Amino acid sequence: MDISSLLCLPVEANDEAQPAPPVRTPRTRDQVERPTLTPAPTKRSSPLDAPAAPTKSPAPSKPPAASKKRRSNASTTLSMVPDKERKRAYRMSANQRERRRNYEAHESRVYNLTLDINDLRQQVRYLTERRDLHVMRSLLTRQHFERDVLSVVDRILCGFRDEALGLTPNERGFFFSGILPGTAATGGGHEFILQRGRPIFSHRAVAITSIRVLSFVGDDVEADDEEAAELRRLCGGSGGCVVETLGNFTGRITRATITALFPHILCNEALVAQLLGLRIACPARLLMYFDGQRRIVQQTAHADIMMALKSLREARPNDFAALMGRSR
């Protein structure tokens, strides 16, 4: 074909010679087969025509089910585990099973013993608290008891100093009946200072040096020695105590004093006249025994008469011998 004929060809014919552009469709996830490239059909033309470019065929919109199954089979992989890493089923021997049973029994006993030990510790703690409370209660009870008996002794001594407690005979009897059991209210060491409710010394003065609880009577009878047993007998059982009072008594001898202390010399008027008005200073020690009800069950007065009559003994030994012949 010559050049003139090529120039005379229509434009439509030239358009038909051009291949159609490929249509691109989106790929799906389930697509298995890759699309194959197929060359578009070309129309035989002259050597001056441009060569046609290869195009891709459109992918199918939905892959077949067989391709999906083929893919799942293809994704399954087999891996080889080394022999040393392979986990085998372990079977214990009879000795091992026996040791395991014995160890389980041992663990059970240890657990039970641990519970018992914790329970015993709790009981010991509880008993320790009870013991401490009992000791504290005993100390408080003893302090209250000591306070009460000391107040009773102080009131009695102040009453002796202030002429029979400053009470009438009936009131005085009521007071002593509360602190003295039975007939003990009319006897005892207070007769050294009072005689029928009246003082037996003139120009008297009482100086109290100390008042203290000498000892308590405990509840443990088996732990008593001879002195503690005698103290328990005097106090009438457990719960009592002994109160010691030390002091000095100063006064002048009257006829009431001679009647109370030296009645055997009343027939010797000369000696009585020489003793009247004699000033004496007598150290005294008073012991009062209380029972558990805070009542005085025993009282003992110790007066140093020899020290009180020291001046008479040095000045007139004969009169002193006659005075002390049958004195109380």
Image (cartoon, rainbow, N blue to C red):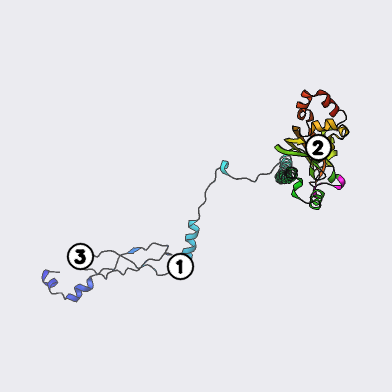
* Residue 257, numbered circle: 2
Pick the residue in front: 229 or 245. Answer: 245
Q: In the image, is residue 180 part of the stretch drawn in magenta?
A: yes
Q: Circle 2 — which element?
A: helix
- Amino acid residing under circle 2: Thr
- Amino acid residing under circle 1: Pro
Magenta segment, which residues?
A: 178-183
Mark 1 or mark 2, earlier in chain: 1
The answer to which quarter of the image holds residue 143 is top right
* Residue shown at the point (76%, 50%) measured from the top left: 167
Name the residue tied to disc 1: 64
Pick the residue in front: 106 or 228. Answer: 228
Name the residue tied to disc 3: 50
Q: Position of residue 79 (x, y in %)?
A: 52, 49
* Residue shown at the point (76%, 28%) measured from the top left: 307
Task: Tell which tag, 3 or 2, sits nearer the viewer.
Answer: 2
Predominant SS of the magenta segment: helix
Q: Position of residue 144 (x, y in %)?
A: 72, 46
Is residue 299 among what the camera can see? no
* Residue shown at the point (82%, 46%) measured from the top left: 180
